Image: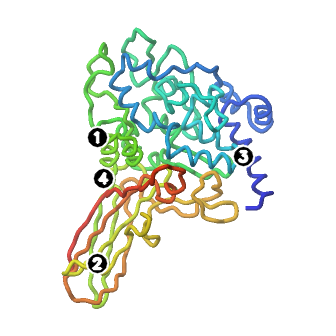
Amino acid sequence: MSSKKFGLLIVIMLIGAVLVVGCQGDSLEEANKAESAEQMDLAEINSFEEGAFEDSNNCAGCHGEIHAEWSESMHRFGWENEFYQPDYLKASQETDGFTDVFCGECHAPTAVRTGQLPPADGSQFDAVSKQGISCDYCHTVKEVVEPVNVQTVSEPGDIKRGPRGDGSSPGHEIEYSEVHTEAAFCGSCHNVEHPTSEVAVIDTYDDWKEGPYAEEGIRCQDCHMTPTPGIAENPGKSSPMGEDREHIATHYFPGGSAFFHEKSGQDERAEMAKEMLRAAAELEAEATRNNDSLELLTTVNNVGAGHKIPTGVTYIRKMWLEVTVSNEAGEEIYTSGHEIADNQIDPEAVFYLKLFEDAEGNTTNKSWLAEDIAYDRRIPAQGSDEEIFEIPVETDEELDITVRLLYRSMSQEAADGFDSEEELKVPSIEMARKELQVE
């Protein structure tokens, strides 16, 4: 991209960024000229003084178990995340600060709404802003205007909102909130649209809405706020003085981020992430031998995820097929998708991911440069994907075939780009496996 074109793009992006958050001074004046009164009203409504949102540690006294769950969740580490920060700062540098608030409103929403972000380095953050997606941010959301780019209305204060309104608390008022019972609440962050190109950077909510689970009334909360993959009950109390309930929503929010939890020493949370991944997919495989070749048909079925797999930042994550064909002596005569030097993955592997196209037509995994979708091979909810491998065979021996669906929370390429004192080696997680023999 030429410097002149990139400069023009940044100007447009900066105007778009102002629309998302309540900014002050000259930036607000520019946005007023460019956008409707309705959009600006939302930005003004979400502008608060520092200290407007409560420290999540204040919640621990009554909601100890829930607080403990949240404390090791990816929501808690939305901002203080060693794998997020380098990419975030790189984006900020390359876009002259455009992504400071665009990415920041999901990862540190209270910082944006109290004027502590920018600067991108978080040097103005108070303790609450460092807590990422905090208790008080979520439980003071009053309205979801549209489930994309954090278009929510906050109303911090004494009233805490949630899926029930029949309890009582000595510390705050309680109000039933229909918003908190809807998948759109999750979609406000888990749907991200580029503000100038309108490319779907993250489309998890849209995937769900367009799929079979939404039609069946199964929400994000039904799978990601339960103790195990799928819909399960968690009987108990939300606080010691609370009522006994058939289900108390868990606040682990498990997804596929096993590597982060492992590096943080959160082994139980890492195992939860792996359980989610293993429950998402099943593999089928059948092979046909034809003289000097072998035709292997593989099918990956999305049986457990309410959205496409993989989802989220799929331009950074990796999901792929590994195929191994061995002879009777156990010697590998064919491989695809195996690890190669420096923990990289065979570049010829069958990958499931989404990549972007920049303004020059080049493929990129930098979401802030996305002008179009260059490649998108993901598997929708209750959908499947087939691949045929044509494998040359020079023996009439019986063959053993192993097919594995593997996943990495982030690519090794991304890990290599971190300025880390220790070598970061991203492990591969087996989501599904199929073994067969061919005579």
The x and y percentages for residue 420 are 50, 49
Q: Residue 85, percent across and down?
A: 55, 43
Q: Residues within 10 Å of mark 4 (few under 14, many from 20)?
A: many
Sequence-wise, the earlier of marks 2 and 1 is 1
Q: Which mark is residue 332?
A: 2
Q: Which mark is residue 96?
A: 3
Which label sits on residue 278?
4
Type of the residue with mark 2: Glu
Name the front one of labels 4 and 3. Answer: 3
Give the CA distance from mark 2 to mark 1.
37 Å
The disc labelled 4 sits on which kind of residue?
Arg
The x and y percentages for residue 52 are 58, 19
Q: Taking the image as drawn, is residue 168 in sight?
A: yes
Mark 1: which amino acid? Thr
Mark 4 and mark 3 lie on one chain; the one further toward the N terminus is 3
Q: Residues within 10 Å of mark 3 (few under 14, many from 20)?
A: some
In terms of image quadrants, where is residue 329? bottom left
